[in-house]
């Protein structure tokens, strides 16, 4: 007889195969409008605004009509730099209905970072909030493909007018298919600068459905979902879609607030959300716990003892981990029937429609219990990286995608992530490419070489540490930490700034003279020792 946890995942997979998924984002929103009509789709509570499913459907159609009249056509790229506001979902749906491609832009980007993404993505239109107009105007390299007439600003009435005046209903000039491209989603990688993941309509429909129903085949009474992740990342978008599949209403925060988090849960009777582990410690048990209506939380990367403590504190709620990435959507899920296995540092079993294997450096599958790189296959992944043939050659092996992450699988089939092959720092869910930060540091005349490594941090997962090798004859007093940080702040988003800075005479090196970062990490007992701490403004 098949084990209960394995049977649960396979049953969810069978249910997915039996489900006629909407072919496109536009078709999905239209179906939700027909089915749910006047129900609130999203409530942006900090802005005191809301959209019903019918309003979302109609506004998306009207904007699609306006954009089409301006010359937007199937396959064209539209960069979007908006905070978590209702227009973001309207814009995404409208772009998809035309058959065009959205390029989400991180709202924390500097002018140089924005310039890179707009130019690299070949964006022809740019939709942005008014707070980012001066940043756009100050870019060092204005994209030639974006004419002024195609720069559309929210907050000045311009974008709002396009939503109000467009025709309804809208019929796209070209048919839009499930296999058509919907997003070019930029994510940091080992090449040092962000790479654009090409993601289809099918990708988004599969990830939305899968994350909605990998809960033992039940929606667990989920009617209100809290979404606090930024919409320029996949996380915020898949949470919206999964909530819509559950006929639920999303309560959307502009930005995360640990201090307000429990108030949100209580005030809006939230049933599901991604729960940041630090919030558990920030809000100790109290009588207010009785007002919590949670039924399911994503406990991504939580320590086993925290998951156990959470479920003891909130016995009506399941806390489950998973593993995914922008390129794949979801790769593993922890089933409801995991039992005591849930209280390990595992990210679960194979997700529906995902096949996994762990391989050695030669691509040979390793025995269970041994470490290796995780490879993933299955439908609805990224097409590839936009304009990155070398990265595509590196990432794909026939039908398999190389994650660059180190895993092992235990005898029960559960997967455990143990590290990354990729040279990155993961801070509060943000992937920070070491080479990007190193390139900025190397621009300083005083610096000969720099090496970025992760420092484990209980609250944020990892922090950025910069090892600095100065030019001969120059000392730390000539190039102090504050000056280095100020230089980085001109070109890097704040979350990429080094927290720790240490000076070295030289680095340990490989035979080919590359900096041996793994040796540096292995040979250093305390990565904070001897470093300047930007946050605490002290030397450890």
Image (cartoon, rainbow, N blue to C red):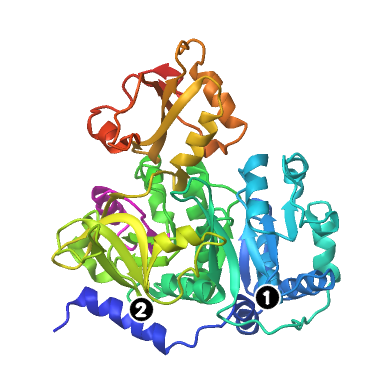
**Which quadrant holds residue 220?**
bottom left
Answer yes or no: is residue 242 visible.
Answer: yes
Label 1 sits on a secondary structure element that is loop
Q: Distance between the residues labelled 2 and 1?
A: 32 Å
The residue shown at (50%, 59%) is: 235
Magenta stretch holds residue 479 = no
In front: 432, or 47? 432
Image quarter where the N terminus lies is bottom left
Q: Is residue 228 left or right of residue 80?
A: left
Label 1 Cα crowd, 10 Å radius (few <14 / some 14-19 / many 20+):
many
Q: Nearer the viewer, mark 2 or mark 1?
A: 1
Label annotation for residue 217 = 2
In front: 198, or 7? 198
Range of residues picked out in magenta: 293-317
Instruction: First in sequence, mark 2 or 1: give its number.
Output: 1
The answer to whether 364 is drawn above or below residue 299 in the figure is below
Label annotation for residue 99 = 1
Q: How many labels does the image show?
A: 2
In front: 47, or 394? 394
């Amino acid at each position: 007889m098949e084990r209960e946890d394995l049977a649960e995942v396979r049953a969810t997979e069978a249910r997915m195969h039996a489900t006629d998924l909407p072919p496109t984002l536009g078709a999905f929103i239209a179906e939700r409008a027909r089915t749910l009509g006047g129900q609130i789709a999203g409530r942006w509570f900090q802005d005191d605004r809301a959209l019903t499913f019918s309003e979302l459907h109609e506004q998306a159609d009207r904007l699609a009509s306006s954009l089409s009249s301006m010359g937007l056509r199937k396959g064209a790229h539209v960069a979007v730099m908006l905070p978590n506001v209702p227009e973001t979902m309207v814009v995404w749906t409208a772009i998809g209905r035309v058959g065009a491609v959205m390029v989400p832009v991180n709202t924390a980007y500097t002018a140089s970072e924005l310039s890179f993404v707009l130019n690299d993505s070949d964006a022809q239109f740019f939709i942005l909030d008014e707070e980012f107009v001066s940043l756009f105007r100050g870019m060092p390299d204005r994209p030639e493909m974006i004419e002024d007439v195609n720069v559309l600003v929210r907050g000045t009435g311009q974008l709002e007018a396009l939503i109000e005046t467009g025709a309804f209903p809208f019929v796209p000039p070209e048919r839009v298919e499930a296999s058509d491209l919907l997003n070019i989603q930029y994510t940091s990688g080992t090449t040092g600068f962000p790479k654009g993941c090409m993601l289809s309509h099918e990708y988004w429909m599969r990830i939305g459905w899968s994350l909605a129903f990998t809960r033992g085949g039940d929606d667990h009474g989920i009617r209100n979902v809290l979404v606090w992740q930024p919409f320029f990342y996949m996380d915020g978008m898949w949470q919206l879609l999964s909530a819509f599949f559950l006929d639920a209403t999303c309560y959307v925060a502009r930005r995360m607030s640990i201090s307000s988090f429990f108030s949100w849960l209580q005030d809006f009777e939230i049933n599901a959300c991604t729960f940041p582990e630090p919030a558990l410690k920030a809000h100790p048990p109290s009588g207010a716990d009785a007002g919590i209506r949670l039924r399911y939380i994503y406990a991504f990367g939580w320590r086993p003892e925290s998951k156990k403590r959470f479920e003891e504190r909130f016995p009506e709620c399941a806390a489950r981990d998973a593993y995914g990435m922008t390129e794949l959507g979801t790769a593993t899920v922890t089933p409801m029937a995991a039992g005591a296995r849930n209280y390990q540092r595992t990210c679960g079993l194979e997700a529906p429609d995902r096949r996994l294997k762990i391989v050695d450096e030669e691509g040979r599958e390793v025995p269970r219990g041994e470490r290796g790189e995780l490879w993933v296959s299955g439908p609805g992944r990224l097409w590839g990286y936009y304009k990155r043939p070398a990265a595509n050659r590196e990432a794909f092996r026939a039908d398999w995608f190389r994650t660059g992450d180190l895993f092992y699988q235990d005898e029960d089939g559960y997967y455990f992530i143990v590290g990354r092959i990729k040279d990155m720092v993961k801070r509060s869910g943000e992937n920070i490419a070491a080479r990007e930060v190193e390139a900025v540091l190397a621009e300083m005349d005083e610096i000969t070489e720099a090496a970025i490594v992760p420092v484990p941090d209980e609250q944020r997962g990892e922090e950025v540490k910069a090892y600095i090798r100065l030019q001969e004859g120059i000392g730390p007093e000539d190039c102090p930490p504050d000056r280095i940080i100020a230089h980085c702040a001109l070109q890097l988003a704040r979350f990429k700034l080094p927290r720790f800075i240490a000076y070295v005479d030289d680095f340990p090196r490989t035979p080919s003279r590359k900096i041996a970062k793994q040796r540096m990490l292995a040979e250093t007992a305390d990565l904070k020792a001897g470093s300047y701490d930007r946050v605490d403004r002290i030397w450890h």
